[in-house]
Image (spheres, rainbow, N blue to C red):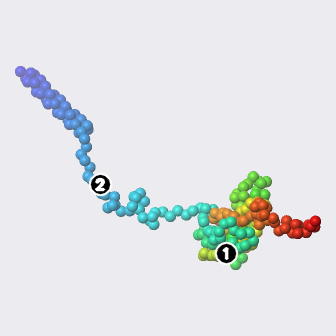
Amino acid sequence: LKPYWLKTQLDRTALYFNLLAAMLDEDVLERTWSTRPASPQLPRAESLPPSMFTRTLDPRQGPQMRSPPTQECMIRLCTAEPAPRGEPVEVECKLSKSVLSELRRPTGLTAASKHDRKAAFLVALDTELLRANGQGSGLRPLQAARRRLLAQGCQCAPRVRLSEGCARVRLELAPQAVPGRESVVLLQVVVEAAIDKSHWVHFGRLVPVRIAAPAAALAEGSGEPTAGDRKASRSRPRN
C-alpha cells in the first residue's frame, strides 16, 4: 500500500503545481492584454513655466540671433528716388556691432598702438564701372562691389568717414551718364586700416540708389527740342 499512497501524493502535488502554473499564466495574459489604467491628468499649459518650446514664450526671452556681417542693414536713404542728377543725396547711417568690434580689433601690422588704427567709411560705387571691371572675371556688379581691387576704382563720390552712433551725411553722387536711362549707385560701409590701405573689409548690405537720367536724354526721348537744337535753329539764315 505504501507505493500506491506515495504515487497518489505525487500525482496530487503535480496536479496542484499544474493548476497553479495555469492560473499564473492566465493572470499574466490578462494583465498583458487588458487596457492600462488612465494616467493622471497633465497640468494645463498656462500653469507651466515659460520655455523655448511653449507657445506662450515672450519674444524677449528667446535666443537673440545676430545677422551675418554682410546682411546687416546700416544705411537708410532719406532722399526720394530717382534722385536728381547733380544734387546731393541725404543718407542716414548707423554702425553695427560687427563694425565697432572690427574697429577695436588691432591689425597687428605695427607695435605702435597710436598708428594701429582703423576707420569706417561710407563709399559710393558706380554700377557701370563695376560692370565694366567685372566683365573680365565674369562678375556681376554686386559681386564686383565686394572685391577691393575692383571696387576702389569705381567710386563716384568722395567717401565719408563714419563714427559711432547714428549719423546723417550728404553725398554728391556723380555716376556715369547713360543716355536714355537712369544710373544706379551702390552704397557700402567699409573698414580701412590707417597704415595699410589694402585692409579693406566690407560690412552690411549694398543699398542701391537710382539717379535720374540726364536732362538732355529726357528731352530727346520726349520729342522736345534740346538747348543745342534751339541754338542751331536760331543760327540758321532766314530766307
Of 8 and 56, nearer the camera is: 56
Dot 1: within a 10 Å radius of its alpha carbon, few (fewer than 14), some, or many (20 or more) residues? Answer: some
Q: Quadrant of residue 180?
A: bottom right
Q: Residue furthest left?
A: 1
The amino acid pointed to by label 1 is Val
Q: Secondary structure at mark 1?
A: strand
Q: Quadrant of residue 69?
A: bottom right
Residue 32 vertical placement versus 147 (above, below): above
Which part of the image, by quadrant, shows the C terminus? bottom right
Dot 2: within a 10 Å radius of its alpha carbon, few (fewer than 14), some, or many (20 or more) residues? Answer: few
The circle on residue 42 is 2
Count of numbered marks:
2
Q: Which residue is mark 1?
A: 169
Of 123 and 196, nearer the camera is: 123
Cα distance in 3D space between marks 2 and 1: 60 Å
Q: Choose the circle earlier in sequence order: 2 or 1.
A: 2
Residue 23 in sight from this viewpoint? yes
Of 233 and 38, nearer the camera is: 233
Residue at 65% in and 70% down: 79
Q: Where residue 10 sits in the image (x, y, percent)?
A: 13, 26
Residue 118 in sight from this viewpoint? no
Looking at the rendered image, the disc whose residue lies closer to the viewer, 2 or 1, is 1
Q: Where residue 145 sits in the image (x, y, percent)?
A: 71, 61
